[in-house]
Amino acid sequence: MTIDQFNFAGKKAFVRVDFNVPLDENFNITDDTRIRAALPTLKKILNGGGSVIIGSHLGRPKGVTNKYSLKHILGHVSELLGVDVQFANDCMSEEAAMKAAALQPGEALLLENLRFYAEEEGKPRGLADDATDDEKAVAKKAVKESQKDFTKKLASYADCYVNDAFGTAHRAHASTALIAAYFDKDHKMFGYLMEKEVKAVDKVMNDIQRPFTAIMGGSKVSSKIEIIENLLSKVDNLIVTGGMTYTFTKAMGGKIGNSICEEDKLELALELMKKAKEKGVNLVLATDAKIADSFSNDANTRFCKVNEIPDGWEGLDIGPESEKAFAEVIKNSKTILWNGPTGVFEFENFTHGSRSVGEAIVEATKNGAFSLVGGGDSVACVNKFGLASGVSYVSTGGGALLEAIEGKVLPGIAAINA
């Protein structure tokens, strides 16, 4: 069932959204992108004569805490939605059940942070540091048992279930996956955001126009190993950049000064290079770097060969030679995936490499390429540089997108398709 096929008239929809937005010390929202992303789905239901029960998490609370209360965002959600959204102070309370039952067409109810309950994630809390394995097993079993009741109660509030939280689709939590089992296939569906995310990932992984180029940044090879290995069987070009550059460079015998490096992953880096060669993948690494004499925006800087970085200096971005090489590969591509910046883009003096990659992707997109940008830092990059509108799709999912690229089945997606 799709959201466009379903008749919401007179129906109550439990909509799982991702309103995990950043708040400042005064609880003001500093970036409402995730809330805005869910508006088309929520408005579709309300305009169709339905009512919505909105469920979300905020942060990683270990119990009830004011810091992570969704009441802080209630006013802004109401303003954006154009409806006076009601609030339930406890998602499991009788108040929540009664407010959900009393909802009239066109009305909305926001439940308090679902993660205030351990049952949402299905993980025990409050275990002593010295808890035995037996104690941990008993606690885990107890929370799993109570998770069933928690999930069943959430499901009882509504006639249908809509998952529009791609950012949590890789979690088999109560509200993101388990709840779907309480609705038949004609009463559970993706929201518009989830639909777009699923289609974008499917296009970049299964409907490939070649050449296909993936740009993988980030500081650690270890955190990207499964993604890189999966991509090696799909891409024509793999640009490995960011902090990972220096692990590969050192593995090849280069001098990297004080640059970030995973000493225990040098052999792995060589293995990945060998696999790329065997599969005919063009593995592209930086040849020069913008180096600094300290990890600071105000450090002294200069350019040098990536394998000739002096002691006391560290690579914090790619150099002009690498920018040119990366851009050439990107501009000649028809499918592009970007995950991870080329350097420490948070420092203004080390944004140039990431900006040049973003601009090359925009140019390739103008020329007909399909480009998908995902992962928190890459999304922050395109937003910071004002390039988001120039790429085909900007994913809202960090971990979910990465696991999808790894080839994993995401529980939140599987539960709707079941």
Image: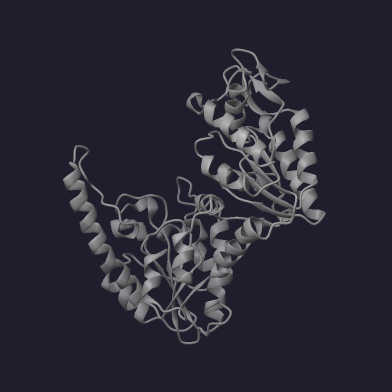
Residue, x 51% and y 51% (percent of image)?
403
**Closer to us: 346 or 238:** 238
Q: Quadrant of residue 359?
A: top right
Please indicate, yes or no, whether residue 346 appears anywhere in the rendered image: no
The residue most toward the right is 367
Q: Is residue 25 above or below residue 343?
A: below
| Horizontal side of residue 170 vs 278, given as left or right | left
Q: Is residue 164 above or below residue 13?
A: above
Q: In x, y percent, where is residue 417?
A: 48, 70
Looking at the rendered structure, the number of numbered marks drawn on it comes to 0
The residue most toward the front is 278
Q: Quadrant of the C terminus?
A: bottom left
Q: Quadrant of residue 112?
A: bottom left
Indicate the colouring scheme: one colour
Residue, x 26% and y 68% (percent of image)?
149
Q: In x, y percent, where is residue 91?
A: 33, 66
| Horizontal side of residue 196 vs 417, given as left or right | right
Q: Is residue 142 above or below residue 255?
A: below
Residue, x 50% and y 39% (percent of image)?
223
Q: Quadrant of residue 240?
A: top right
| Horizontal side of residue 417 vs 178, given as left or right | right
Q: In x, y percent, where is residue 66?
A: 35, 53
**Closer to us: 15 or 211:** 211
Please indicate, yes or no, whether residue 115 appears anywhere in the rendered image: yes
